[in-house]
Image: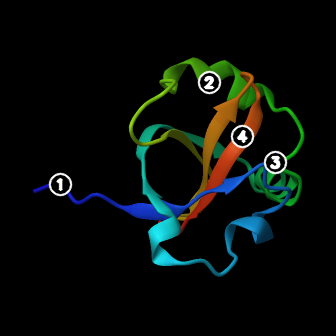
Amino acid sequence: METTMYLYFSRWPRTIKDLKKLHAPEEELPFTIVKTIVLSAIDYENFRTDLTVDRGFIEENAALCRKGAPCPDCLLIKRAKCADGILVVPEQGRFVGMAAYFPG
């Protein structure tokens, strides 16, 4: 039996701190991970501290995320050898439109 996970998605987040704020459970959305992208430690640190910059790795994989899906199709961006990461819903092909902290 498949379990559906729900997480809080922030619209236009600036840093990972925006993804970890307190919220009501009804603000959480179901999601689908369509691809996992593993970054080096320094690249992941750069990404999580500035989510507003356009990223080539998002642009290269944005087409995998269906538009208008009932639950967000996400790219899971994580650091090598770590279970947690950031779920990204691309916008305009290369930007983070929505994101959620994924605890792993």
Q: Which amino acid does label 1 sit on?
A: Glu
Q: Is residue 3 visible?
A: yes
Few, some or many residues within 10 Å of mark 4 (<14, 14–19, 20+) = some
Which of the two labelled residues, at mark 1 and mark 2, occupies the earlier sequence position?
A: 1
- Residue depicted at 41% across the width and 42% down the height: 71
| Above or below, 60 relative to 87 | above
Q: What residue type is labelled 4?
A: Gly
The spot of residue 76 in percent (x, y) is 55, 46
Q: Nearer the viewer, residue 75 or 6?
A: 6
Assign a secondary structure to mark 3.
Answer: helix
The spot of residue 5 in percent (x, y) is 35, 61
Q: Is label 1 in contact with label 4 (beta carbons under 8 Å)?
A: no
Which of the two labelled residues, at mark 4 and mark 3, occupies the earlier sequence position?
A: 3
Q: Mark 2 points at which residue?
A: 62
Q: Name the residue under label 1.
A: 2
Few, some or many residues within 10 Å of mark 2 (<14, 14–19, 20+) = many
Q: Nearer the viewer, residue 41 or 22?
A: 22
Between marks 4 and 3 in the image, the one whose residue lies nearer the viewer: 4
Q: Which amino acid does label 2 sit on?
A: Ala
Q: Is label 3 in contact with label 2 (beta carbons under 8 Å)?
A: no
